[in-house]
């Protein structure tokens, strides 16, 4: 089990235009034998909110599986806190909703990601049409945002435990409770503009996807129906200090429905493509055929990268925390599941759309 910091093959630092409490960086791992089988597909990886690239490396088997399958792996870094250091492990993204300082200061993480893509394509033997994105939690939301806004540069997205935060759903709030100066609410679909049919047209935009209908990308989402962070039924959090946009997660089923509509998928073409586990620890995936692939999985689980076993307490300390009880983490993030292995499913999904689907397949 790899809990130590990885020895990156390459550490990239972007230009001074991408400074935020120090230069924006990224880290690269190269597959065995590189560059013998160029050009290589690329997987850009986004850690969760208040986490880091090193933590994502430690809590998943992404490096083991992705490198074996011949991918160049690029671990991106969110921004550190302004009162922290450049090495602060608690980093955040501006995925659309509130995730700490990145969203509060409207940091342009899409532009940062584009700069990373440009740098990777110029430095390494890569396939420019095979740049994939994957993320967990707020990193999953960030991957969906980048895929949406930069669809012309992306070959596919795998989002684990995140949402599509393109609309401000503040007016959809209902059944609210207040604790510690933050008001948490359910998402009410009965409010005008808050139904699946209306939210993309009637709610204020956080960002838009001008080209997604014309440059379609395969999308796989794996979400937990017991995720307290991005509730499957939708939620709104109001009252974060020094922030002009509330945190709003639409009901999760809105998201694959949005992509299916953009891609012209027929509802009748729905297929169950994965089913595993037993009651209390299960996952089911559905895909739509006859259009650009949209796959949507529901796990009986919370806010985790599913299926990969690791030393939670060591990882928690790596993230700069001191209270590292796994049981308390389950109470905060919801249960873990082994009914689906997000790492294998992610790279199998990506490999369907690679130039040679049989190359280094597991």
Image (cartoon, grey):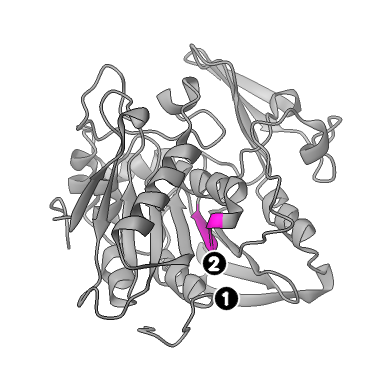
- Residue stretch in magenta: 153-160
User: Which quadrant is home to the N terminus?
Assistant: bottom left
Is residue 328 positioned above or below 350 on the image? Answer: above
Is residue 318 visible in this depiction of the protein?
Answer: yes
Helix, strand or loop under label 2: strand
Q: Are the residues tagged 1 and 2 within 8 Å (C-beta)?
A: yes
Say left or right for 260 vs 319.
right
Instruction: Give the structural element (helix, strand or loop) at label 1.
Output: strand
Image-based side of 328 in relation to 86, left or right: right
Q: Is residue 352 above or below residue 56?
A: below
Determine which residue is flagged by label 1: 274
Question: Main SS type for the magenta part?
Answer: strand
Asked if the magenta segment contains residue 155, the reply would be yes
Looking at the image, residue 207 sits to the left or right of residue 306; the answer is right
User: Label for residue 360?
Assistant: none
Numbered badge on residue 283: 2
């Amino acid at each position: 089990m790899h809990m130590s910091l990885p020895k990156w093959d390459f550490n990239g630092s972007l230009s001074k235009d991408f400074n935020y409490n120090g230069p924006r960086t990224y880290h690269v791992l190269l597959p065995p034998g590189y560059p013998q089988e160029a050009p290589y597909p690329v997987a850009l990886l986004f850690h969760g909110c208040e986490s880091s690239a090193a933590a994502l490396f430690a809590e998943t088997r992404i490096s083991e599986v992705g490198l074996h399958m011949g991918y160049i792996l690029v671990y991106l870094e969110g921004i550190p806190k302004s009162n922290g250091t450049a090495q602060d492990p608690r980093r955040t993204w501006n995925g659309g909703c509130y995730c700490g300082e990145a969203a509060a200061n409207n940091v342009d993480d899409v532009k940062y990601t584009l700069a990373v893509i440009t740098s990777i394509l110029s430095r390494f033997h890569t396939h420019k049409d095979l740049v994939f994105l994957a993320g967990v939690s707020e990193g999953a939301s960030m991957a969906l945002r980048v895929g949406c806004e930069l669809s012309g540069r992306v070959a596919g997205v795998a989002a684990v435990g995140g949402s599509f935060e393109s609309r401000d759903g503040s007016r959809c709030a209902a059944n609210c409770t207040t604790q510690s100066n933050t008001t948490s609410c359910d998402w009410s679909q009965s409010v005008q503009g808050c139904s699946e049919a209306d939210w993309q047209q009637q709610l204020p935009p956080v960002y838009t996807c001008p080209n997604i209908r014309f440059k379609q990308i395969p999308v796989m989402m794996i979400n937990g129906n017991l995720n307290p962070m991005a509730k499957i039924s939708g939620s709104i959090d109001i009252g974060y200090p020094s922030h002009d946009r509330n945190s709003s997660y639409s009901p999760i089923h809105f998201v694959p429905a949005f992509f299916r509509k953009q891609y012209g998928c027929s509802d009748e073409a729905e297929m169950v493509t994965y089913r595993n586990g037993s009651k209390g620890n299960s996952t089911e995936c559905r895909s739509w055929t006859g259009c650009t692939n949209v796959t949507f999985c529901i796990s009986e689980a919370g806010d985790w990268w599913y299926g990969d076993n690791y030393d939670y307490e060591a990882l928690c300390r790596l993230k700069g925390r001191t209270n590292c009880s796994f049981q308390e983490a389950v109470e905060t993030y919801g249960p873990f599941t082994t009914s689906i292995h997000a790492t294998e499913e992610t790279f199998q999904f990506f490999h369907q759309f690679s130039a040679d689907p049989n190359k280094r397949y597991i």
